[in-house]
Amino acid sequence: MAAQFTNSYTSGHAVQPDGSVDFLCSTDTDKWPWLTLGSHHPITVQAQNFWTSVGAIMALGGMEAGQWSALTWTDWECGAAECGMAIRGAYSREKSGENESYLVTLFDAQSREIVRMRGRGVVFRNRNFEDWRGKSKKAAKREVSTEPFAFAAREALGIGPSEHALIGQVASDGQTIPVLVSRENGLPPANPMISGSGDHVNSVHMIEASRQALCLVETNPALAVTGGEMELNRYVELGTPFALKIVAQSDAEVCFELSQLDRSCAKITLRWRSR
């Protein structure tokens, strides 16, 4: 394993003649607490997206010590609701037109397909973001409010005792939801269910904030996310508020635009059903 990772959710990587990779998944809930959220919870899916794709890329020799990856696009579709915890998976590459992406499929102990995830990203040499993100980081610090952020009520968001609210109440326009992700609510040890780089808001934070916003908008903390899509265009700074705005909505799908410092950073679509 490359030196930048001291643990890995996947193991036993076997590179196949066609360039695909088979692997095993950990079921250790002490090491990976987000597994307790359920196989289809967006936090679980997004964490698996990271670990499975990075593990396979390393097995293929596409990522060296000192290199890091950044996700730019992903979509996913969950299998049957009764699927259990992932024990194995498969990684392959796909190409559609000029776009190349990866495909990860995870299976439970009964060989049921839990989730199918696609994604694109970039691999870069180091994580020294300070130079080329210096201006945005300074601007973000200036936007940090001295007033306490008013988080939405926990019972409206479908979160357990170890999780934290990331969002505030829906604004008066009925479409905009304020969000604040900090070390105090979005990273271990305060929030053991979400991990990340610690440098910026990661995709797993964005997807959980969107899930919480959907629960609030639909007044249904028990809804189940069945799939979705994310386009990630700009870094989102930790500790500085940002906003999710509904740009499209139907009975079973919602699309949010994520903006920070008056700049569009991401688009996040969630598909869902009531339990």
Image: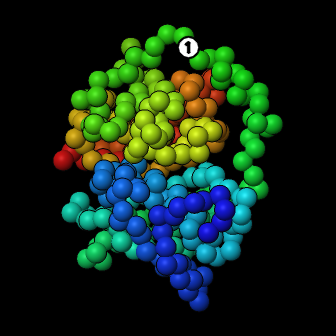
Q: How many marks?
A: 1
Left or right: where 28 falls relative to 206: left
- Give coordinates of residue 212: x percent, y percent: 35, 35
Extreme residue toward the left, this view: 275
Q: Position of residue 191 (x, y in %)?
A: 41, 38
The residue drawn where x is 76% and y is 36% is 130
Position of residue 244 relative to residue 162, above or below, is above
Residue 73 pos. (x, y %): 57, 52
Dot 1: within a 10 Å radius of its alpha carbon, few (fewer than 14), some, or many (20 or more) residues?
few
| Residue 8 visible within the image | yes
Task: Indicate the colouring scheme.
Answer: rainbow
Quadrant into which the N terminus falls: bottom right
Question: Is residue 221 rendered to the left or right of residue 7?
Answer: left
Q: Secondary structure at mark 1?
A: loop
In this view, which residue lies farthest toward the right? 131
Residue name at image x 40 percent, y 48 percent? 43
Residue at 49% x, 10% y is 147
Seen in the picture, residue 204 relative to 167 is either above or below; the reply is below
Q: Residue at x 53, y 61 (%)?
A: 7
The x and y percentages for residue 13 are 52, 78
Q: Nearer the viewer, residue 146 or 273?
A: 146
Residue 234, above or below 56: above
Question: In the figure, residue 202 lies in which quadrant?
Answer: top right
| Residue pointed to by mark 1 | 145
Q: What residue type is disc 1 on?
A: Ser
Give the side of residue 141 with respect to residue 227, left or right: right
**In the rendered image of this protein, does residue 151 appear above or below residue 12?**
above
Q: Residue furthest top?
A: 147
Q: Is residue 255 visible?
A: no
